[in-house]
Amino acid sequence: MAELTQKQRRGGILPPPSDYGGGPRDSGGSFPISKAYLATWILLTAIIMLFAGLSSAYIVLRGLPEWQNITVPRLVWANTLILVASSVAIEFARAAVRKDQFSVVRQWLFVSGILGLSFLAGQIAVWRQLVKAGVYLSTTLHSSFFYVLTGAHALHLAGGICGLVVVLWRAFGNQLTAANHEPLKVWALYWHFMDVVWIYCFLLLLLA
């Protein structure tokens, strides 16, 4: 039977096993990616639309005569490096899960989570520095967009932390294996995407 299956695959009768999501195809065989991946991409599309709308308004209002730039705390640079480091830790975890190194996977996921929480703490510190300097949400248009963009990103990143809790729970139960680690893949996609969104907002607020 196994020999017949291999021949059928080589002959094009059966589709090759999907690598998306680390598991079997949908029961109908019509989806090349899992439902979790599809739902994640729908969510990411909504996030793209949100930040695209905010950045468009930012660029339009940036040309107004009353626009006044604020001095962005230098801590933002350190926060950026921390968030990038968290994504690097995720990739180490993904490399480890392909080798079924369960303890290593847990360690790197934990490191990524700590770095993610450190980023959020750093963002709170940035907002506190601005408040201490007398820069509030309504002080200038630039400050308004700074608070709104960074706040929206922090909110979505906090959602990513909640997702990490689920992934960690499965990791500690040795449920993430080389053959099936879809939760880690989906969460990594979301987390890396939030990295890209942050770098975009960072460059927009500092350079545009």
Image (spheres, helix red, strand yellow):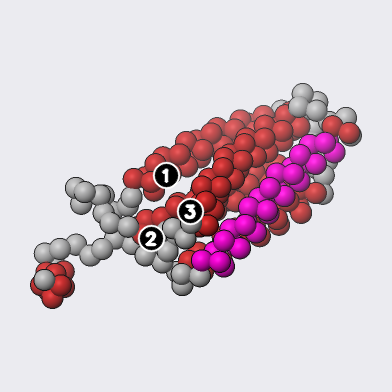
Q: Tag 2 or tag 3, which sits nearer the N-term?
A: 3
The amino acid sitting under disc 1 is Trp
Numbered circle sitting on residue 170: 3
Residues at circles 2 and 1 in contact by the CB criterion of under 8 Å: no
Depth order, front residue of 37/108: 108
Label 1 to label 3, Cα distance in Å? 22 Å
Numbered circle sitting on residue 180: 2
Q: Disc 1 marks which residue? A: 41
- Circle 1 — which element? helix
Can you give x and y, in whole percent of width and height, for residue 74 in the image? 82, 49
Farthest-out residue, bottom: 3
Depth order, front residue of 97/59: 97
Can you give x and y, in whole percent of width and height, for residue 49 in the image? 50, 35
Label 3 to label 2, Cα distance in Å? 11 Å
Mark 3 closeness class: few <14, some 14–19, many ≥20 residues within 10 Å: some
Magenta-colored span: 102-130
Label 2 to label 1, Cα distance in Å? 20 Å
Residue at screen point 52% across, 51% down:
169
Farthest-out residue, front: 173
Can you give x and y, in whole percent of width and height, for residue 161 in the image? 59, 45
Residue at screen point 51% across, 66% down:
102
Numbered circle sitting on residue 199: none
Horizontal side of 145 relative to 55 (left or right) equals right
Horizontal side of 184 relative to 104 (left or right) equals left
Residue at screen point 68% across, 54% down:
115
Image-quadrant location for residue 120 = top right
- Mark 3 vs mark 2, foreground winner is 3
Horizontal side of 20 relative to 119 (left or right) equals left
- Circle 2 — which element? loop
